[in-house]
Amino acid sequence: MSEWPLPVPPTPPPAPASLSATLSASSPMSTPEPESESLCASAPSPTRRDTQPYALVIGESIVDIVPDEAGVPHEFAGGSPMNVAVGLARLGRPTTLATWYGADLRGMLIASHLRGSGVTPLPGSERARRTPTAQVFFDEHRSATYEFDLEWRMPPLGDAPTPLVVHTGSIGATLAPGAADVLAAVRALAPHASVSYDPNARPHVIGSPDANRAQIEACVAAADIVKASAEDLEWLYGTAADIEHPWLGTADGGPKLLVVTQGGDGVTAWTSKGVHVQVPGERVEVADTVGAGDSFMSALIHALWSADLLGATNRDKLADISTQQLTEILNFCTRVAAITVSRPGANPPWLREL
């Protein structure tokens, strides 16, 4: 087995990566000081990929073209799975991203952002013909919608060591031709790793609910942990009511934990063992909502990791999570998401900010 590049311990940059920042020299990175709180405890620095637990995230990386309040466009590295990978790495978790971007200036922006946050790109991720983009539009409440220009393929995993957890979602898990490879990879890894999934639907790219329902439900069935927004469920089924019943798994397989986010109205979660928890959202002044759900997803994986509820051997423990523990985890996740929406762009917090 050949050795992969090792993840670099991250140091916080002053802001999300922008194209101008990419073209300037970056300073050397140093290791952040460890935290002591339970949910804010970072993973130890890895020595080898095949012995140190790590997260594998599979999905798209995109350059978001975001207008400021004056309408002037600015370019930032984004994409739902990439945001999840960045959020995990900033919380101290060794993270590899299997993604697809070009060897162009915008690809340099993505590579710089990943490197600055401590994410290791899977070798071969930079072979796209051009780097995907998403034009971001805001309504009067600074809630974001997107118009995409992209293609998606999944780079081969090769001799990748087995991760503790694999996460996928959004465009990468639904857009052909890469989506079939993503689902096959997740199914192959599922006997050995936890699987998390966030549909994070982008209808302008992937098409109608009818065209995507079977693929999304196949990803749900392969997952242990599913996080979806109420908007996702309403788009897919016309209503979010009672969706926990068909989506939750059983003793024979399927999701052990389903979390539905409702923006400022909070979060609802169900487990396959019948636990039902609701927590309110945190009230903050919203800069914009870009990356809010992705930072919540990162925090959820991180918190379950801290609670020793990840890994194929811990599926029963995950299903048996208590109401108190799940409530504490969801409150942590809403705090992380609140920090993200309080500042522009997909800029999830670092561990030391918590």
Image: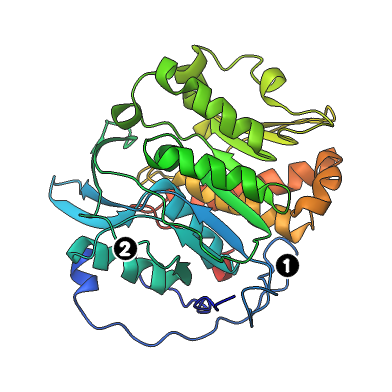
- Sequence-wise first label, 1 or 2: 1
* Disc sitting over residue 167 in the figure: none
| Rendered location of residue 173, percent (x, y) | 46, 39
| Total numbered labels placed on residues in the image | 2
Residue 307 versus residue 121 in the image, above or below: above
| Residue 279 appears anywhere in the view | no
Name the residue type under label 1: Glu
Name the residue type under label 2: Glu
Residue that numbered label 1 is attached to? 37
Residue at figure coordinates x 34%, y 55% from the top left? 100
* Image-quadrant location for residue 36: bottom right
**185 and 269: which one is in front?**
185
Q: Is residue 4 left or right of residue 161?
A: left
Within-10-Å neighbours for mark 1: few <14, some 14–19, many 20+: few
| Display colour scheme | rainbow
| Rendered location of residue 104, percent (x, y) | 19, 64
**74 and 214: which one is in front?**
214
Residue 147 versus residue 34 in the image, above or below: above
Q: Is residue 254 left or right of residue 76?
A: right
Residue at figure coordinates x 37%, y 64% from the top left? 124
**Alpha carbon separation for disc pair 1 and 2:** 37 Å
| Rendered location of residue 315, percent (x, y) | 80, 45
Residue 293 versus residue 232 in the image, above or below: below
* Disc sitting over residue 126 in the figure: 2
Residue with the most extreme top position: 238
Residue at figure coordinates x 68%, y 22% from the top left? 244
Within-10-Å neighbours for mark 2: few <14, some 14–19, many 20+: many
